[in-house]
Image (cartoon, helix red, strand yellow):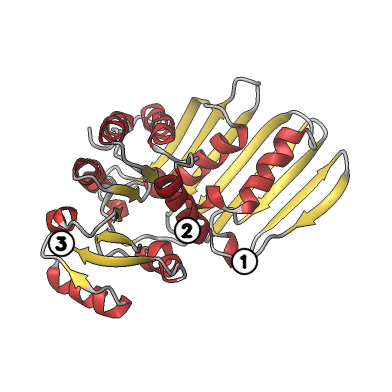
Amino acid sequence: MTFNFGVLGAAKITPMALLEPVSAEPLTRAYCIAARDPIRAAAFAKAHHIGKVHPDYQAVLDDPVVDAVYIALPISEHAQWTNKALSAGKHVLCEKSLASNAAEALGMQHQAKHSNRVLMEAFHYRYHPLFDAAIEVIHSGEIGTVEHLEALFHVKGPIPTDDIRRNYALGGGVLMDIGCYPVSWVRHLMQSEPQVMRANAVTDPEEVDVEMTATLSFSNGAAAMIQGSMQAGADFKAVIEVVGSKGQMTVRNPLVPQLGHELIVTGIHGSRRVTFDQRASYAYQLDAFLGAVQRGHSLWTDAKDAVKQLTVIDACYKKAGLRLRGG
């Protein structure tokens, strides 16, 4: 039986994040779509061979053919439409950040449990073999005890002022969309939750963060510096550096390894450089989502993890003297 996705929003990320991996799965399809602008939804559907266009989001949720909903709306709308989708009996794959703040995410976690449906935050990187290998390096002791981590994600700036990432009311801010990756990277590498010691933000005239730098502390004594940037002058960079008591590790492009990556390790076994296949991280993410829905497999980036993730993000905003999103 074919597994049918309904799509909320005609977002730029949707073809890469969902449509391409779905097209490679013979028993999975993007069945329908709705967007705020019906004309845009129709054009998007035609361009990407989606067979049905609904007049609004609710119509997607009401469609009995739809098994799961992919949500790529502004972050400020994630909680509302995720909860409605779960209440309608649909599984949900929602783009990051899952919610505007940890309190919203906790409500979504409760709704997923109440509805007995899968809710997954779309941190696709976590399902690629590159990241599993990086975790194994740390927890095997190959580089000794972790002492310091540095995780950076910069996108080429400046981001236009009319971009939703520059709009506080829509859940904008570099930490919500870009800096959330370094936060997630260090949390999942360490497999524990950090305390935010300090955070500094560069803001635009609307007090939306365009660069965020934070120092985190883990219970084993390790410190982490995370940074996300979309300000003018920034160029693309996605890298993790880990220093241990007996060596170090570099992960180049943990974000989208399919576009080129490298794992470089110098430790108790000497030095090595490792690469993996070019299968897209989004394809691995789809595998994980379908495994959770159809076979009850656990997820690394479920709603419970999202609450922990957003707790760190909230703390960064507080330490930087900025308002929480959704506040």
Disc 3 + disc 1, Cβ < 8 Å:
no
Q: Given the image, on which type of amino acid does mark 2 rest? A: Val
Provide the residue designation for mark 1: 278
Left or right side of 123 for 268: right
Q: Given the image, on which type of amino acid does mark 1 rest? A: Gln
**Occupied quadrant, residue 286:** bottom left
Q: Is the N terminus in the top left, top right, bottom left or bottom right quadrant?
A: bottom left
Q: Position of residue 280 (x, y in %)?
A: 54, 63
Residue at the front extreme of this rendering: 1
Which mark is on residue 261?
none
Looking at the image, tell me whether mark 3 or mark 2 is earlier in sequence order.
Answer: 3
**Crowding at mark 2 (Cα within 10 Å: few <14, some 14-19, many 20+):** some
Which mark is on residue 36?
3
Q: Position of residue 97 (x, y in %)?
A: 36, 44
Q: Is residue 110 above or below residue 76?
A: above
Measuring 30% from the left and 63% from the top, which residue is drawn there? 11
Q: Is residue 164 visible?
A: yes
Label 3 or label 1, whichever lies nearer to me, is 1
| Real-space Cα separation, disc 3 to disc 1, in angstroms | 34 Å
| Real-space Cα separation, disc 1 to disc 2, in angstroms | 22 Å
Residue at the left extreme of this rendering: 55
Q: Which secondary structure lies at badge 1?
A: loop
Q: Is residue 234 visible?
A: no
